[in-house]
Image (spheres, rainbow, N blue to C red):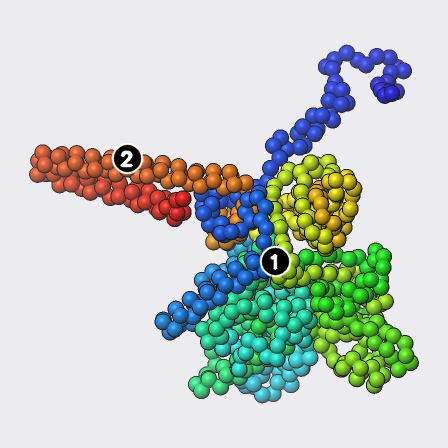
Amino acid sequence: MSMYYGAGPESAAGARPSGKKGKAPQDTIASFWSKYLEKAPSKITAVFPPTLYADLLPQGSARTGTSVSRSAAESYNAAVAQCKARVARIVRECHRTNEKFVDAEFDLEGDFGRFNCLRGLTNSSDAANVEDQAPDTGYDVSDLRAGLSLILGSGVLGFDTQNAPLNLAALSSVLNREPASPPRYPSAVHRVDWIYEKPEFLIDGFSDLDVQQGANGDCWWLAAVATLCSVEGVMDRVCVARDEECGVYGFVFFRDGEWIWTVIDDNLYLNTSDYQWDDYDARGEKERKWKERYQTGSTALYFARSSDLNETWLPLLEKAFAKVHGDYGSIEGGLMGEGVEDMTGGVTSCLYTNRILNKNRLWTELKNENKEFLWALGSPGASDTTAKNGIALSHAYSISEAVEVKGEDGKTVKLVKVRNPWGKRNQAGNGEWDGPWSDGSKEWTPYWMKKLDHTFGDDGIFWISYEDLLKRFRIIDRTRLFGPDWHVVQKWTSVNVAWVAGYMKHKFKVTIKKAGPVVVVLTQLDSRYFKGLEGPYSFELHFILRSIKDNEEIVRARDNPGGDRRSISAEVDLEPGEYEVIPKILAQRWDDVPRVENVVKKYAEANPQKLRQIGINHDIANAKGLTAEEVQAAKDANEEEVKEVEKDNEKAEKAAKTEEVEAKDAKDDAKPEEKEKATEETDSDTEKESSDDDEDDDEVRIFSLNPRS
């Protein structure tokens, strides 16, 4: 039974005054929702007209709503083959022209000062133009130190610096004690053979000890790289082709269910600018010393670097990862597990340490004896401090190994070897665990030092007990690797997300023909590839795996409330039968993120080059959700558009010829003094018409760039 209460306090004083009849409460609510909700919910799936990209989609990609089934190795092998073929073609061209390779798609040297290789399409304030941003007025200690040293050594101020109005010697001493921070932007670009004295792509194999973070905030990805180095052969599957003489390198990455490949040149950013002082240096001695001190070896690099002064694989790998995402800014901030996925094609499960049910079971997996998993750690965040017990907060760490060892007393100890991608402690001395089993702690007897082959040092590496690890870290990312014996089936689709969230009618049906382990993943497009065009909504994923025959719920997978992971997964053993995956998607609107249509309008003029780069990434990604009918419709529209332009072009040509004939007749009939005037007018008209024809030709050439099917 329902009861409706309509009388309020005013009813005791008499009837409501006559006048315009007010809305009923339910009508007011209905009116609010009518204005609040979209009449036709939709998402922008194409920044550019479909005619511009319909025929640019990768062949064989899962770009429609049909299912794609293949072995786990098939997509990888295809990407590697294409990458190697491209590198081989570049090498042949380099030898033919006697020039090193220059990557026109990600040219650090050509882009220097324009920032398209450094920054994303938009910035935090969404300035209309990158030029509108306030210039950086800060000073870097390394620049001040170098400049002051040069002044003191030149003698231009006299050699009695102690009696100078400003005690330059004292200032120089202070600056030399201060650690230098990287400048806001790189100061120079040079090739590998210019930076390194004896460059080698790989020295003594891939090692987590090589990984050192630079000026970029990509610790999440570097922690993933260090994790990959802990398993032999994994990094070799990412760095697949190179020719160091020609300066060309090929890499493969995993994106949206497919392996992709990319090729880069060997230009890298440096911390310090080239020698530019005006003082006399006829023999180039000062310039040589400047280069030797500030621009030589891995320490000269602005972004990530290897610990070995001559090893180059890490900065080149980072550059390739930045290129496929559009710029270095797009790889700032992220989740370690997703970084591992991007380089392995694996599937990551996020484990919260305060929710682990069976710690012994997790320990067995963590020891990773079968090399089936890769592991990474995330420290908790805090608003009042940057570190706790030496561990940097809101930071990513990699796990190198987990061991179970008997001590001198016969007791077994569970220890985990962890590494900070910084490769060292920060200025405050934080970054490494400072509790039991940390460097210099009482637990390190000569027995244990030899047993674990450990040495103390400021290298970002530390040991921690399994018990303390579960207490001090918040997240453990476990990424399952898939060998060739695994089979992959995927299907992309598009769905409308309701404001009131619930499990959807849209379902994925799965048929299992043989009993065994199954990994189910619900994922969304990786918006990191089109940052600035992702729009103001983020989506939180959930799903239920259910048996159709028994109508029994088997797994309920969900992200953490407010989570921003691009995928969720569940691993379970299934018997033969039919199952269904039922998604649930929660949407969150962020008012500080610009709408896609506004970004396109602004940057089509402000930075068209960057919009083209990020826009095509956006459109090709979103085309995965298109149906086959929608893809064909785009191609048909392309044909119709070209036909219309050709018709307009034919009409314009006929009109131009008619005007030329009429002008010629008029010129023949004119008097001598009028003939000159008519000729001038005709030439002027012809020039204008020719100009119009050029514009039409440009349009025709643009439309004709898309081959017709």
> Looking at the figure, which quarter contains the N terminus?
top right
Classify residue 167 by image quadrant.
bottom right
In the rendered structure, the answer to whether residue 424 lies left or right of residue 463 reads: left
Q: Residue at x 40, y 70 (%)?
A: 92
Q: Residue at x 70, y 60 (%)?
A: 480
Provide the residue designation for mark 1. 72
Q: Position of residue 663 (x, y in %)?
A: 17, 36
541 shown above or below 35: below
Q: Secondary structure at mark 2?
A: helix
Q: Earlier in the sequence, mark 2 or mark 1?
A: 1
Number of the label disc, if any, that sits on residue 129: none
Q: Position of residue 182 (x, y in %)?
A: 62, 70
Disc 1 residue type (three-letter): Ala
Assess disc 2: are there few (<14), some (14-19) or many (≥20) residues with their C-alpha within 10 Å of its C-alpha: few
Q: Residue at x 36, y 36 (%)?
A: 644
Q: Position of residue 255 (x, y in %)?
A: 59, 56
Assess disc 1: are there few (<14), some (14-19) or many (≥20) residues with their C-alpha within 10 Å of its C-alpha: some
22 shown above or below 494: above
Provide the residue designation for mark 2. 651
Of the two numbered discs 2 and 1 in the rendering, the one whose residue sits closer to the viewer: 1
Q: Nearer the viewer, residue 456 or 262?
A: 262
The answer to whether any part of residue 181 appears in the image is: no
Disc 2 residue type (three-letter): Lys
414 shown above or below 348: below
In the rendered structure, the answer to whether residue 674 lies left or right of residue 629 reads: left
405 shown above or below 345: below
Q: Nearer the viewer, residue 626 or 645?
A: 626
Q: Residue at x 77, y 60 (%)?
A: 475
In the rendered structure, the answer to whether residue 679 lies left or right of residue 43 reads: left
